[in-house]
Image (spheres, rainbow, N blue to C red):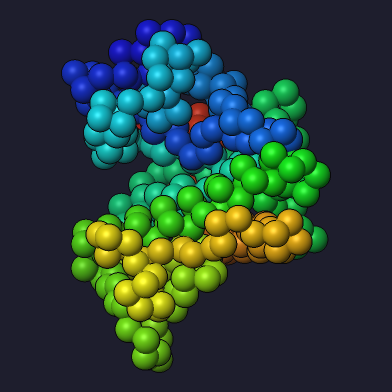
Amino acid sequence: MGISRWKIVNDMEHIQSTQVFSGGACNVLDAQGQLLRNAERDRINDWLTEYNITFFDPQIHPDTHGEEYNFEKHHPLEMEARSVAKINLYEVSPRTFSGITSFEIAADHFRWNEPMVLYFSDGSHESDHIPAHSQLGHPLFVPEGIHTNERAMRAHYAEFVKNGNNMRKYLVRMARETHSLTVTFEERVHTGDIMVSPERMHAAEMFRAMVMASSGQRVIVNFSGGPKARDAAGNPLFILPIFPPQVEMRALLDQYVDEGNALRRAIAELIKISVFTRVVYTQRAAILAMEELLRVKRILQ
């Protein structure tokens, strides 16, 4: 079990006792481009522990788990915890892109119809405010230092490339597990296909494909670009210049922010609301929503 401040599951022996999966935004880049542990869910996790709720937190860190993240140990734990948890809590932070998190939300919500609290946080563990949002109310992607600090710009650029490639790999893997999702690598465009080119991220489009497939709709995702746009294993690549001039990098980072905003808007528009789903924007609201769902599932009396 957990060995520090929370009632967390930290080994396979106790993983079946997981009641809540508390995932989503993990490490964040600060205004200087340094990678820091995201503490936005600490207050929520404190509350879960106070009420004796056993949960799994995939943000493995010495401060909270007593050890560093180890893929061989913790990835199998994460997969098993997600499968046995009664309720999912997903945080979408304005400081992280949330690409893989969006896929997990789609799979859990539409494929498995699991009770969920979707928490759009404000990006600060020291406050509890409504997050930055558009005029229509959609939460925004607001990475720190992306326009003002050279080191942060380069760190965000690396995240841009990593997120684009990871989302493509995840989608290809899901196609092997989901009969309604098919990926192709044709240059010819067919009506109804979702096209993903190597030069653009296409985050919102890939999320929509996950939603459709998880809902049981037949969907074909066509990765264009030919053999040069795939890695040695055959996965489609997101291809950006390695060392772009500053002006080009700024333009590409503007695209990154636009992609993050489009993804958040797609999540907000496509998630169907039900008794078992809560979409919230503050820690306080997340705790109240967790309490409601825990009572619905008879975990809290």
Residue beneath the point at 37% across and 86% down = 187
Q: Is residue 265 among the parts visible in the rendering?
A: no
Q: Nearer the viewer, residue 202 or 102?
A: 202
Asked whether residue 247 appears in the rendered view, the answer is yes
Which quadrant is the N terminus positioned in?
A: top left
Answer left or right for 72 relative to 54. Answer: left
Task: Name which residue lies at 59% across and 21% down.
Answer: 43
Tell me residue 100's x, y (percent). Answer: 44, 50
Q: Residue furthest left?
A: 13
In the displayed structure, would residue 185 be above or below residue 154?
below
4 and 216: which one is in front?
4
Q: Is residue 79 left or right of residue 271?
A: left
The residue shown at (72%, 33%) is: 32
In the rendered image of this protein, does residue 281 appear above or below residue 182? above
In-image side of 4 versus 249 (left or right):
left
Q: Decide: is 51 above or below 238.
A: above
* Figure quadrant of the C terminus: top left
x 56%, y 62%: residue: 241
Given residues 244 and 237, the one toward you in this image is 244
Q: Is residue 232 left or right of residue 161?
A: left
**Image coordinates for residue 206, horizontal then vertical, percent:** 45, 66
